[in-house]
Amino acid sequence: MNPFAYLFQDWQANRQNFKGQLIMFLFRLLQAFNKYTITKIIFFPYLMWYRLCVEWILGIELPRKLTIGKMLSLYHGQALVVNKGTIIGENCILRNSTTIGHKKLADGTFSKCPRIGNNVDIGANVCIIGDVTIGDNVVIGAGSIVIKNIPAGCVAVGNPARVLEEKKP
C-alpha cells in the first residue's frame, strides 16, 4: 500500500472543497507525526503550527488524539469542535458550528465522549454531548441537540433530538 494514501484518504470525500481537503490532509499528517514520541519531538514545530493555523485561525478543532475513520467530509468548516475522546466512523459528514464532546456530570466528573457510526450525516449547528452512541446510516438534522443514543438507520431532529423516522433497509 502506498504510504501517502493515508494522507489523502479524505481527498475524494472533500472534492471541490479545497479547504476541507487541506484541513483533513493536515490532520492526517498530524496523526502520522503523533504516533511515536521521537516524531512528536522532531515535528514539534508542526504540531504548534497546526494548532495556530487550523484551530485558531480557521476555527476547526480536530485534536491530534481524535479517532476518525476514512472519508470524513467537512462542509463549511467553521466553528467545528470535536473532543479528543470522540470516535467518528467512516464516510461521515460534519457541517459548520457543530460541537461533539463530553459533558460535566453532577458529581463534577466528565462523561465519556460520543461514538459515531459509519455513514452519519450531521447537520449544521448540531451539539452531540455525553456518553452517546449514534448508529450507522443516521441523519441528524440541523440545530439538533443529541443527548441520548440514536439507533442505526434513523433520522433524528430537535432539541433534544428524537427519532423522526427510521429508514428501511
Image (cartoon, rainbow, N blue to C red):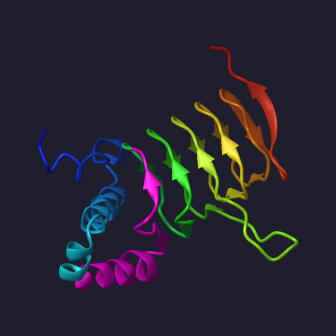
Q: In this rendered view, identify the residue nearer to me: 50 or 155.
A: 50
- Placement of 67 over or under 2, stated as above or below: below
Which residue is the extreme one toward the left? 2
What's the residue at 23%, 82% (across, down)?
41
What's the residue at 73%, 69% (across, down)?
110
Q: In this rendered view, identify the residue nearer to me: 129 or 73.
A: 129
Which residue is the extreme one toward the top? 169
Q: Residue 105's spot in the image, x, y percent?
A: 82, 69
Where residue 150 sits, quadrant-wise, is: top right
- Magenta stretch? 44-69
What's the residue at 44%, 39% (across, down)?
90
Q: Residue 122's spot in the image, x, y percent?
A: 60, 47
Q: Residue 22's spot in the image, x, y percent?
A: 29, 62
**Left or right: where 165 falls relative to 106:** left
Q: Number of labelled discs?
A: 0
The C terminus lies in which quarter of the figure?
Answer: top right
What's the residue at 30%, 59% (across, down)?
28
Which residue is the extreme one toward the right? 106
- Placement of 6 over or under 48, stated as above or below: above
**Left or right: where 144 falls relative to 5:** right
Q: In this rendered view, identify the residue nearer to me: 162 or 77.
A: 162
**Left or right: where 131 falls relative to 3:** right
Q: Is residue 83 magenta?
A: no
Q: Residue 165's spot in the image, x, y percent?
A: 77, 27
The N terminus lies in which quarter of the figure?
Answer: top left
- Placement of 52 over or under 115, stated as above or below: below
**Left or right: where 156 falls relative to 31:** right
Q: Is residue 65 magenta?
A: yes
Which residue is the extreme one toward the front? 37
Where residue 57 sits, quadrant-wise, is: bottom left
